[in-house]
Image (cartoon, grey):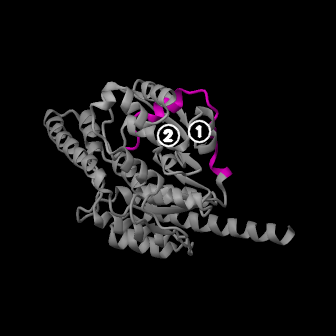
């Protein structure tokens, strides 16, 4: 979920904390992806006309594998070095959010069945996108494909986004790649959103927008808002995070920011604002989750050879992918990697 409505506050500000980029600018850069964030995107968007995920001949979901193959092929062809960080054990405070998501899926499931009975495929697809579930088998398949593509996999002890942020803090990665702003609360100095989502996108009503990668600098953001990292975390608590879903009633992004600027900290806000005082929130524990997350430090990240035969064997023989459809992309990526490697060797020789 991320921090509720934080993007609305940041997008409405005139602070120059983000820069539009193109994929070529990230060549030779290591980018730490929050794996679950990416996989849920694929499970939500890669679906058939009725809103169902794509599956193999045995009924196993393949939407996430299609997404991983196509997205990472483009990244590797551009010389970008992705690293995928997988979630470990969730913090106990996140259990409420997990329960909320489960309830929402049950509601969406009933709405989906109703839409299908009525023949409303547009609504069925919309409801189907809310039914995404990531199973241990799907996680294992994702890791298997990534490793065949030579892409490092990091297993986080806790939140994947926190571990990705730590890779960036330590300089192992250039940036954390995620659609959520949570990585900033975990201290990631650089966040890249919309990575590999560049291009035009059709919106309902016929409107067309252009999507480009955007690089967000935490220091510029804090300086522009004139707040500290701790105050950014408190702002997240007011708006509602994965650890206190829902936030506070009638406290939107502008009001929350006003409170932070006026009172300085959550403790002071709670003492002075009745609507905050009335709700018990373990803000000290939430603050600690972001300031001192459960992560590994000094993680070793090793890139391996891209193995087109191994990729094909897994996808075609084990998961029923069409060889004719996917082989060209797989071998094109292998060729592009070799070209990039040759160019790097030449640059070194003449440098």
The percent position of residue 21, horizontal first and vertical second, equals 64, 43
Give the position of the C terminus as an image quadrant.
bottom right
For the residue pair 209 and 133, the one nearer the viewer reads as 133
Residue of label 2: 232
How many numbered badges does the structure rendering display?
2
User: Residues under labels 2 and 1: Cα distance?
Assistant: 8 Å
Q: Helix or strand or loop: what does disc 1 sit on?
A: helix
| Label 1: how many Cα within 10 Å (few below 14, some 14–19, many 20+) | some
Q: Quadrant of residue 241?
A: top left
> Horizontally, is 20 left or right of 59 in the view?
right
Residues at badges 2 and 1 in contact (C-beta under 8 Å)? yes
Residue 9 falls inside the magenta stretch: yes
**Magenta-highlighted residues:** 1-25
Q: Residue at x 64, y 33 (%)?
A: 16
Q: Could you say which is closer to the camera, residue 242 or residue 348? A: 242
From the image, tell me which residue sits under label 1.
222
- Asked whether 119 or 142 is in front, the reply is 142
- Residue at the location (46% across, 25% down)? 254
Left or right, residue 221 beside residue 309: right
Please tell me whether residue 145 belongs to the stretch shown in magenta: no
Extreme-right residue of the structure: 350
**Is the residue marked by circle 2 packed among few (<14), some (14-19), or many (20+) residues within 10 Å?**
many
- Residue 86 x %, y %: 41, 62
């Amino acid at each position: 979920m991320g921090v509720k409505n934080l993007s609305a506050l940041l997008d409405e500000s005139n602070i120059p904390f983000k820069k539009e980029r193109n994929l070529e600018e990230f060549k030779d850069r290591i980018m730490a992806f929050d794996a679950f964030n990416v996989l849920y995107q694929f499970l939500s968007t890669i679906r058939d006309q009725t809103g169902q995920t794509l599956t193999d001949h045995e009924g196993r979901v393949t939407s996430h594998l299609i997404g991983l193959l196509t997205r990472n092929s483009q990244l590797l062809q551009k010389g970008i070095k992705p690293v995928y960080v997988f979630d470990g054990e969730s913090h106990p405070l996140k259990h409420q959010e997990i329960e909320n998501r489960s309830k929402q899926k049950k509601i969406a499931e009933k709405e989906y069945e109703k839409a299908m009975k009525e023949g409303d495929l547009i609504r069925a697809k919309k409801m189907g996108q809310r039914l995404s579930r990531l199973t241990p088998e799907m996680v294992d398949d994702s890791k298997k494909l990534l490793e065949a593509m030579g892409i490092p996999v990091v297993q986080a002890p806790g939140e994947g986004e926190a571990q990705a942020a730590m890779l960036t803090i330590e300089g192992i990665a250039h940036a954390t790649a995620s659609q959520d702003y949570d990585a900033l609360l975990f201290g990631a100095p650089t966040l890249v959103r919309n990575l590999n989502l560049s291009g035009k996108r059709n919106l309902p009503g016929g409107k067309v927008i252009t999507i480009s990668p955007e690089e967000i600098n935490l220091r510029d953001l804090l300086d522009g808002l004139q707040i500290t990292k701790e105050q950014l975390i408190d702002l997240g608590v007011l708006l509602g995070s994965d650890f206190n879903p829902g936030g506070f009633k009638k406290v939107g992004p502008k009001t929350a920011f006003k409170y932070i600027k006026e009172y300085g900290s959550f403790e002071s806000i709670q003492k002075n604002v009745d609507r905050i005082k009335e709700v018990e929130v373990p803000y000290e524990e939430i603050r600690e989750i972001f300031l001192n997350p459960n992560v590994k430090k000094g993680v070793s990240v090793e890139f391996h050879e891209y193995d087109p035969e191994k990729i094909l064997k897994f996808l075609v023989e084990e998961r029923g992918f069409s060889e004719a459809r996917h082989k060209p992309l797989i071998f094109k990526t292998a060729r592009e990697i070799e070209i990039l490697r040759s160019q790097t060797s030449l640059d070194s020789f003449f440098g």
